[in-house]
Amino acid sequence: MSALIDLEDVWLCYGGHPVLSGLTLSVPEGEILALLGPSGCGKSSVLRLILGLTAPDRGVVRLRGETVSENGRIIRLPEERDLAVVFQDLALWPHLTVSGNLNFVLGSKKLPREDKDLLITNALRRVGLAGMEHRYPTALSGGERQRVAIARALVLDPDVILLDEPASNLDVVLKRDLLRMFRQILKEREGTALYVTHDPREAASLGDRIAIMEKGQIVQVGELRQLRALPANDFVRAFVEDI
C-alpha cells in the first residue's frame, strides 16, 4: 500500500531550539492515522511541514510519492499540495453563510454554479446539516460549526485530510458523535487522514493506527491493541493504559 504522506528523517529547529529530531512518519492510502502526544511535543509542526507552511531544516516531505519539501526548501507551495485541513479554531468566516463558507473553497474551481451547489448540498448532507445552507456560523451550536468545518474539508473530495484537534472544545457526547460520523464518512469514501490530538480516547476512537510523539520524535506506531500489549516505554504505557 503506497504512502500518501511520508516524512523521512525530518529535523526542524525554531530559534535554535530543536522541535523535531529525525522524525519519520508515513500514512498509507486509505488509513486514518492519529498523531498523539502532549502539548509542545511537535505535533503542530508536523502539520505545518505537510501543509508547506514551513520547510524542514533537514529531511524530506513527500505527498503521493512526490518530494514537496526537502533540506530547507519548499518545492510545492501550500496551494499546490491539494490538501484539506480542519483547524482547532475552525476558521469559519462569520460574515458568510454555511453555504458561503463551503463555496469559498470552491472559488478557484472553474465549475458551473449548479455543480458547485450540488457539491455543497452533498457535503452538508454527509455531515447531517442538510437544510442549513443559509444559516450563519454564529447561529449554530459548537457541534454544528465543527460539522461545517468538516463539510468544507470534504467538499472538494480530497484524497488527504489533516485535522488539528478539531474536537477539543466539545463535550464528551458531542465529541464521540462527531468522531464516529467522521470515521464513517472517511471509511465510506476510502479517504486518508492524519488526526492530531493530545487525547488518547480521541486517537483510539478515530485512528486505524496511533503514532505516539514525545519531544519531537515518533516513539511508537501501531494499533491500540499492539501499543497496549507491547508499549515501547513507560511514556507510551502511560498514554494507552487508561483508554
Image (cartoon, rainbow, N blue to C red):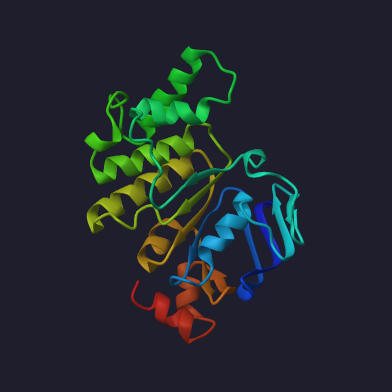
Q: How many marks?
A: 0
* Residue 192 higher or lower than 38, as above or below: above
| Residue that appears at 58% across and 61% down | 46
Q: Quadrant of residue 137?
A: top left
Is residue 206 in view from this perspective?
A: yes
Q: Position of residue 212 (x, y in %)?
A: 51, 71
Apparent side of residue 195 relative to residue 97 in the rendered image (left or right): right
Q: Quadrant of residue 17?
A: bottom right
The residue lying at 47 percent from left, 36 percent from top is: 154
Residue 28 can be seen in this image:
no
In the rendered view, would you say 162 is above or below 22? above
**Residue 100 lies in quadrant:** top left
Residue 108 x %, y %: 58, 26
The outermost residue toward the front is: 15
Relative horizontal placement of residue 120, taking residue 168 as reference (left or right) = right
Q: Is residue 76 above or below residue 26?
A: above
Q: Nearer the viewer, residue 110 or 203?
A: 110
**In which quadrant will I find the C terminus?**
bottom left
Locate residue 9 relative to residue 143 in the image: left or right. Answer: right
Q: Position of residue 163 (x, y in %)?
A: 47, 51
| x and y percentages locating residue 121 in the rendered image | 39, 23
Which residue shows up at 42% across the image and 25% down it?
Answer: 120
Front-most of residues 16 and 193:
16
Give the residue at the far bottom of this rendering: 234
